[in-house]
Amino acid sequence: MATKPLPINALLEDSLSEPAIGTTDCFRWHATPVGIAALWSNGSTPSTPPFDHAVKEGLEVGLDLSREEREFHQVNQGLVLLFHS
């Protein structure tokens, strides 16, 4: 039986096909219906989600994510760090 993607993953994948709201050294930034998504774009996926690094780079594109809830998802496009209230 094939595994169905999680509904949130489908939302993220749709949003990641839209133009990015910003780009930093390690991430492409996207506004999604569920929060701000940081798509890892710097080579191989890190072994642990680099949330602190994303918070620092988010400031470069005008995003203060320091107080947001955090979660990560693996989607077809790669590792996504999701920040939401």
Image (cartoon, rainbow, N blue to C red):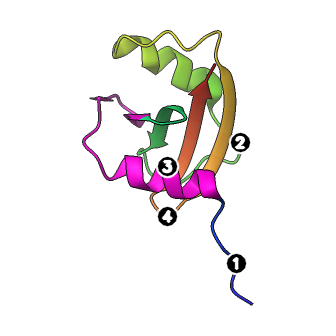
**Residue interval drawn in magenta:** 7-31
Q: Quadrant of the N terminus?
A: bottom right
> Which residue in the structure is indicated by mark 3?
12
Residue contact at pointers 4 and 3, CB within 8 angstroms: no
Residue 30 x %, y %? 38, 35
Question: What's the CA distance linking mark 4 and mark 3?
Answer: 10 Å
Q: Image height check: is 48 above or below 22? A: below
Query: Element under label 1?
Result: loop
Q: Is residue 69 left or right of residue 81?
A: right
Front: mark 4 or 3: 3
Q: Residues within 10 Å of mark 3 (few under 14, many from 20)?
A: many
Q: In the rendered structure, which amino acid carries the disc numbered 2?
A: Thr
Q: Quadrant of the C terminus?
A: top right
Residue at image coords 29%, 37%: 20
Question: What's the CA distance linking mark 1 and mark 4?
Answer: 14 Å
First reached walking from the N terminus: tag 4 or tag 3: 3
Residue at image coords 43%, 13%: 63
The one nearer the camera, 79 or 11, is: 11
Question: What's the CA distance linking mark 1 and mark 2?
Answer: 24 Å
Query: Element under label 4?
Result: loop
> Which residue in the structure is indicated by mark 1?
3
Front: mark 1 or 4: 1
The one nearer the camera, 60 or 37, is: 37
Q: In the rendered structure, which amino acid carries the disc numbered 3?
A: Leu
> Which residue in the structure is indicated by mark 4?
76
Q: In the rendered structure, which amino acid carries the disc numbered 4?
A: Asn
Residue placed furthest toward the bottom: 1
- Please tell me the numbered disc located at residue 48: 2
First reached walking from the N terminus: tag 1 or tag 2: 1
Residue 10 x %, y %? 52, 58
First reached walking from the N terminus: tag 2 or tag 4: 2
